Image (cartoon, grey):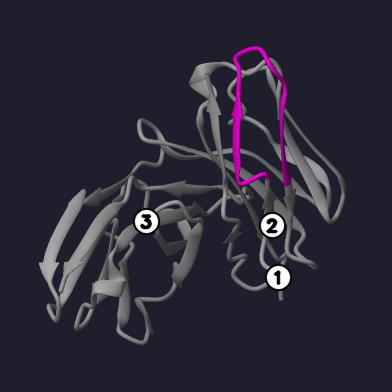
Amino acid sequence: KQEVTQIPAALSVPEGENLVLNCSFTDSAIYNLQWFRQDPGKGLTSLLLIQSSQREQTSGRLNASLDKSSGRSTLYIAASQPGDSATYLCAVRLRDSSYKLIFGSGTRLLVRP
Amino acid sequence: DAGVIQSPRHEVTEMGQEVTLRCKPISGHDYLFWYRQTMMRGLELLIYFNNNVPIDDSGMPEDRFSAKMPNASFSTLKIQPSEPRDSAVYFCASSPDRGYYEQYFGPGTRLTVT
């Protein structure tokens, strides 16, 4: 059974720092991995999607990497800003005929001004 | 383009009452997903549809929960009768049947059952 773990559960950093959020999964047979952002009381916004054949994806100050063999993904945020404060979730889609996403429990990020 | 639309945004009801949550997916998306988010269990997939047909409902917690998709632009999730442990945020998401099948989420419905 696929399990997705995110560490740390919460993170507080001063503005301007570069930071890394971690996501690990137990079954490497994945189709893709998505990173989402969730603001309090809001839905999920997709940030980056990495296919299983890819190693990384970049969007602005965000860079996501994928190491399928070790069951790990990282989300790198450069030059963090207070507006980056949110909960970040990773989710994997299994390499089967289903379209299920298995979510981690998230990392709650606070960027202090 | 309008995103996924959910209504109501907030629902407070008493135990035993019927609750109906509604979702309008993004036009042209062939997949629709219903998720539930709680502090204890995180985000869980309840059921998903492809071209209005339920494909996998293994995440539906019990018979009190039912979901329908009568057409490509509308879906409902019904709880009857509701219980306090059903209190959660319910999300609807949709995905195109092409490309990377990226899922787009609605703003959610916060349900409180007293």
Distance (Cα) linking label 1 and label 3: 23 Å
Q: Nearer the viewer, mark 1 or mark 3?
A: 1
Q: Is residue A106 left or right of residue A79?
A: right
Could you say whether the residue bearing mark 2 is in a helix, strand or loop? strand
- Residue A75 image point, x, y percent: 28, 69
User: Given this view, does label 3 or label 2 mark the residue nearer the observer?
Assistant: 2
Q: Which residues are magenta?
A: B8-22
Along the viewing direction, whichever of B48 and A71 lies nearer the viewer: B48
Q: Residues within 10 Å of mark 2 (few under 14, many from 20)?
A: many
Read off the residue under disc 2.
Answer: B5
Separation of disc 3 and disc 2 at Cα? 21 Å
Give yes or no for contact between labels 2 and 1 (Cβ–Cβ under 8 Å): yes
Taking the image as shown, residue B82 lies to the left or right of residue B28, namely left
Which residue is painted at 72% across and 55% down in the image?
A: B31
Residue A90 in picture, x, y percent from top left: 38, 57
Q: Which of the pair B96/A47 is nearer the observer?
A: A47
Q: Who's the residue at 71% across and 70% down the image?
A: B2
User: The N terminus of chain A lies in which quarter of the figure?
Assistant: top left
Question: Looking at the picture, how far across and down is residue B29, in whole percent?
Answer: 75, 64
Taking the image as shown, residue B25 lies to the left or right of residue B93, namely: right
Which residue was labeled with disc 1? Answer: B2
| Quarter the C terminus of chain A occupies | bottom left
Q: What residue occupies the far top of the structure in this picture?
A: B16
The residue furthest right is B71
The subunit carrying tag 2 is B
* Identity, as a three-letter code, of the amino acid under mark 1: Ala
Tags 3 and 2 touching, CB below 8 Å? no
Q: Is residue B15 rendered magenta in the image?
A: yes
